[in-house]
Image (cartoon, rainbow, N blue to C red):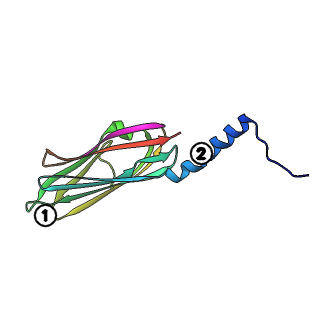
Amino acid sequence: MRRRLELSPKHAIGAFALACVAASALFMHALETREATAPGLALRVAYPERMRFRDSERLTIDVTRTADAPCRAAALTIDEAYLDSFEERRATPAEATLGRFELGGLAPGEQRRIVLELRGERSWFTSGNVTLSCDGERGAQVPLRTFIFP
């Protein structure tokens, strides 16, 4: 007697749904890199475009002084609207206040790196901007948009 696999329509739909969930793992953990420039400043941000709920991902920000003159007081801010979707954040260097990093002076050609470890706690889209300023004047800005899968 030959065996045959018989699935009811409900079982077939369930098997298809499970296959889709398994295939979605291939598309998780996508990183996006964006760059922006302003007079005398360059900003490069690598951030998670997609991540899973309660997984940790890294947001890396590189700041470069491209002008011949130094910047006396550089600051970087990340919108609170973006950061609110992440319960845990570990930043290197530490934040001065929520989403604000005081970088101090930047010499010509000097580069600084800020790294945040983020753990997604609120499912769905979160978006905001990373803004770099020099001596109180707004400079380069990069938009962020991350989808946190439930």
Which mark, residue 25? Answer: none
Residue 48 counted in the magenta span: no
Q: Residue furthest front?
A: 1
The amino acid marked with disc number 1 is Pro
Which residue is tagged 1?
108
The image position of residue 46, as x and y in percent, is: 34, 54
Which of marks 1 and 2 precedes in the sequence? 2
Callout in the foreground (2, 1):
2
- 74 lies above or below 66: above
Instruction: Please state the horizontal and vertical placement of residue 125, each as a whole percent of the image.
Output: 42, 37
- The reply, left or right, for residue 6 in relation to residue 93 is right
Q: Is disc 2 placed on a helix, strand or loop?
A: helix
CA separation in Å, label 2 and label 1: 49 Å
40, above or below 5, in the image: below
Prevalent SS, magenta region: strand
Please count the marks in the image: 2
- Using residue 8 as the reference point, say whether residue 146 is left or right of it: left
Residue 3 visible at all: yes
Where residue 136 sits, quadrant-wise, is top left
Q: Residue furthest bottom?
A: 109
Q: Residue at the spot x=63%, y=41% of the render?
A: 17
**Residue 128: in magenta span:** yes
Question: Could you classify mark 2 by the number of other residues whose Cα lies within 10 Å: few (under 14), some (14-19), or many (20 or more)?
Answer: few
Which residue in the structure is indicated by mark 2? 21
Label 2 is placed on what type of residue? Answer: Val
Q: Which residues are magenta?
A: 123-131
At horizontal 29% and vertical 59% (from top left) the residue drawn is: 113
Residue 92 showing in the rendered view:
no
Residue at 33% across / 41% down in the picture? 98
Look at the numbered disc 1 and give the secondary structure of its residue. Answer: loop
